[in-house]
Image (tube, grey):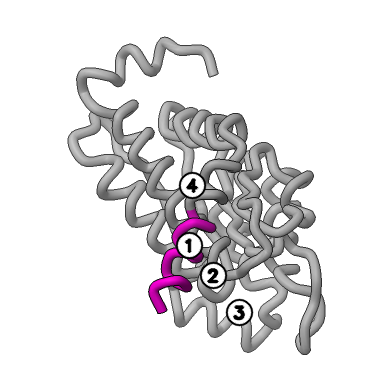
Amino acid sequence: MESRTSAYLSEVADIAGRLDRASIDRAISILFEAWRKDSQVFAIGNGGSASTATHFACDLNKWVSDGATRKFRAFSLVDNIPLVSALTNDSGWGDVYLEQMKNFFRPGDVLVAISVHGGSGSDKAGPWSQNLLKAVKYAKDNGGKVIGLSGFDGGVLKTASDACIVVPASSTPQVEGMHLVLTHLMSEQLRSLLSPDMTTKAESRVY
């Protein structure tokens, strides 16, 4: 038991050490710019990634925005169960995020798409995460920015996003766990930028 625990934690440390810092910084810059322009941030994901989307939206609205002169406006498109179930019932799961984007998304807004495989691969129901990729395309076609969080080889999100943080691992638990670490990292950095004594300095920076 102890050896397995040590091996898992060693793998976590190795993965963290190989994360691309530049892509993390790009993602933070996009989110800060959204806050600066009072744009909206939408987060989406399936399965475990859906819970990360909800958690990230919560952190942006509460933890990051505490004490700020203006708060983030962040929304997880997995949270409205009546709407999600109505869209799924009428149009199918494949359009569940696209249809909500048509309602809410505006030019300048940001979409955070979270997917372990980045929209690559398939299983019993067909190709994975196509509902995310439809939403990503809509965001790009309608004047928005896209941040991707993926793993494995990055999948479609790696090239479809304005900033994509690819977790260098081929293990779903490790990728999902690191995605949560990354959203907390970004939240911590943004909270610092939005703090009253940092906001003026941060707004004057070139991103």
Going from the N terminus, do you reach mark 3 or mark 1 first? Answer: 3
Instruction: Measure how far apart labels 2 and 3 are at the Cα level.
Output: 29 Å
**What kind of element bears circle 3?**
helix
- State the image quarter where residue 193 is shown: top left
Instruction: Measure how far apart labels 4 and 1 are at the Cα level.
Output: 22 Å
**Front disc: 2 or 3:** 2
Residue 79 at x, y percent in the picture: 43, 71
Check contact, mark 1 vs mark 2: CB within 8 A. yes
Q: Identify residue type, mark 1.
A: Gly
Give the dominant element type of the magenta stretch: helix, strand or loop.
helix
Q: Is residue 97 above or below residue 16?
A: below
Highlighted range, magenta: 1-12
Q: At x 55% / y 49%, what residue is drawn? A: 14
Residue beneath disc 3? 87
Q: Is residue 200 above or below residue 117?
A: above
**Front disc: 4 or 2:** 2
Going from the N terminus, do you reach mark 2 or mark 3 first? Answer: 3
**What kind of element bears circle 2?**
helix
Q: Mark 2 packing: few (<14 Cα in 10 Å), some, or many (20+)?
A: few
Residue beneath disc 4? 41
- Label ID, residue 189: none
